[in-house]
């Protein structure tokens, strides 16, 4: 009699244990996936200052590697900061295996495209800052948690893919610093990003009439569109933006003065999350 109750309970317990064990080995403790991803990244990179060459060694815990931060709970890589390392070469598709990554900063390097489509596997990513030569890939647009996107380089060029902003509802900051590199129209999908606070598309060759949907950005703080070929159809659109705290600038409206911003603001929520890392 006692056994008939005990057996189902035991089965449940065993199933649960099995689940916990397989869950932790498959998704939480297997840092070797992250290690092989980073080693593949290193293998594609030209590293003139030998910053990764000796430091990124399998003899040491990857959580101590330069530019790498692991989460305290999972011991998986959550932040990768390779900014200002003078790296060149290509970005390895293995980067897409860093499935816990939330923060990716590769600014002030010299990577060339194409960016690997596997980047789109980084579903947890909130912050991307890249400088690379090449075009914005057409697959770009499926980062449900992305809050900050900055793409820059003097040799970064092409059209902004029309559906680029379809899958980024949380975007707050958008910086495209391309120095004349971007042309075509501002894609309408941008206006789906209702949380945008800071937009800079200045100094490109973007054209067309500024869509009236620009009014939908109710949280906007800075809008920089100067030095493009963008037209404003009704001047009333200009006065809509008097409230902007920083400034507004584009060809036909002159409210505020164009500023050259080399770096940008970090949303408060992200800053709170990442202020512990020294990587800024
Ligand atoms: C971790 O992943 C590697 C493949 O990257 C695999 O060979 C190894 O068996 C995995 N270890 C565990 C404990 O799951
Ligand atoms: C790698 O770099 C980090 C950060 O600069 C440093 O703390 C660590 O000791 C280095 N490890 C090796 C093996 O050089
Ligand atoms: C950066 O790399 C370039 C070549 O890619 C080299 O000419 C230059 O000296 C490097 N700068 C530093 C600070 O190492
Ligand atoms: C990581 O990514 C590469 C390229 O996208 C792939 O070939 C590899 O099988 C992936 N998995 C692991 C565990 O390295
Ligand atoms: C802009 O706001 C208006 C009014 O709230 C709304 O009807 C429209 O769908 C919005 N446009 C976009 C592209 O979200």
Image (cartoon, rainbow, N blue to C red):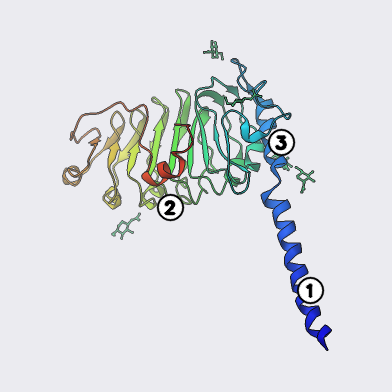
Q: Residue at x 29, y 28 (%)?
A: 227
- Picture disc at residue 36: 3
- Residue 169 - label: 2
Q: Residue at x 50, y 46 (%)?
A: 141
Q: Quadrant of ligand 4?
A: top right
Nearer the observer: mark 2 or 1; the answer is 1
Mark 3 CB lies closer than 8 A to ligand 4 = yes
* Lateral position of residue 278 relative to residue 15, left or right: left
Residue positioned 63% across, 36% down in the render: 63
Quadrant in the picture for the C terminus: top left
Label 1 crowd (10 A; few <14 / some 14-19 / many >=20): few
Return the disc, 3 or 2, that comes first in the chain's sequence.
3
Q: Nearer the viewer, residue 229 or 222?
A: 222
Circle on res. 86: none
Q: Are marks 2 and 1 in contact (CB under 8 Å)?
A: no
Quickly name the residue at label 1. Answer: 11
Q: CA separation, marks 3 and 2?
A: 31 Å
Residue at (73%, 62%) from the top-left corner?
19
Element assignment for label 3: helix
186 or 277: nearer the viewer: 277
Question: Camera-side residue: 54 or 232?
Answer: 54
């Amino acid at each position: 009699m006692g056994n008939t109750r005990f057996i189902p309970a035991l089965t449940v317990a065993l199933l649960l244990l099995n689940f916990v064990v397989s869950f932790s080995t498959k998704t939480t403790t297997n840092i070797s996936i992250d290690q092989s991803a980073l080693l593949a990244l290193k293998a594609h990179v030209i590293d003139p200052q030998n910053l990764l060459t000796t430091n990124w060694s399998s003899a040491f815990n990857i959580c101590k590697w330069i530019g790498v931060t692991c989460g305290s709970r999972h011991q998986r890589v959550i932040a990768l900061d390779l900014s200002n390392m003078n790296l060149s070469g290509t970005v390895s598709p293995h980067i897409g295996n860093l499935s816990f990554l939330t923060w990716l900063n590769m600014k002030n390097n010299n990577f060339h495209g194409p960016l690997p489509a596997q980047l789109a596997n980084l579903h947890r990513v909130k912050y991307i800052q890249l400088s690379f030569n090449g075009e914005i890939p057409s697959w770009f647009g499926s980062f449900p948690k992305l809050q900050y996107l900055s793409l820059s380089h003097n040799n970064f060029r092409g059209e902004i893919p029309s559906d680029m902003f379809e899958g980024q509802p949380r975007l707050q900051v958008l910086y495209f610093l391309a120095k004349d590199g971007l042309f075509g129209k501002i894609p309408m999908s941008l206006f789906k990003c209702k949380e945008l606070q800071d937009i800079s598309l200045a100094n490109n060759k973007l054209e067309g009439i500024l869509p009236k949907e620009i009014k939908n950005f109710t949280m906007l703080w800075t809008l920089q569109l100067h030095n493009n070929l963008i037209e404003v159809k009704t001047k009333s659109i200009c006065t809509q933006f008097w409230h902007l705290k920083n400034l507004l600038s584009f060809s036909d409206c002159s409210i505020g003065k164009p500023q050259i911003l080399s770096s940008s603001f970090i949303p408060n929520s992200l800053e709170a999350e990442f202020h512990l890392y020294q990587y800024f």
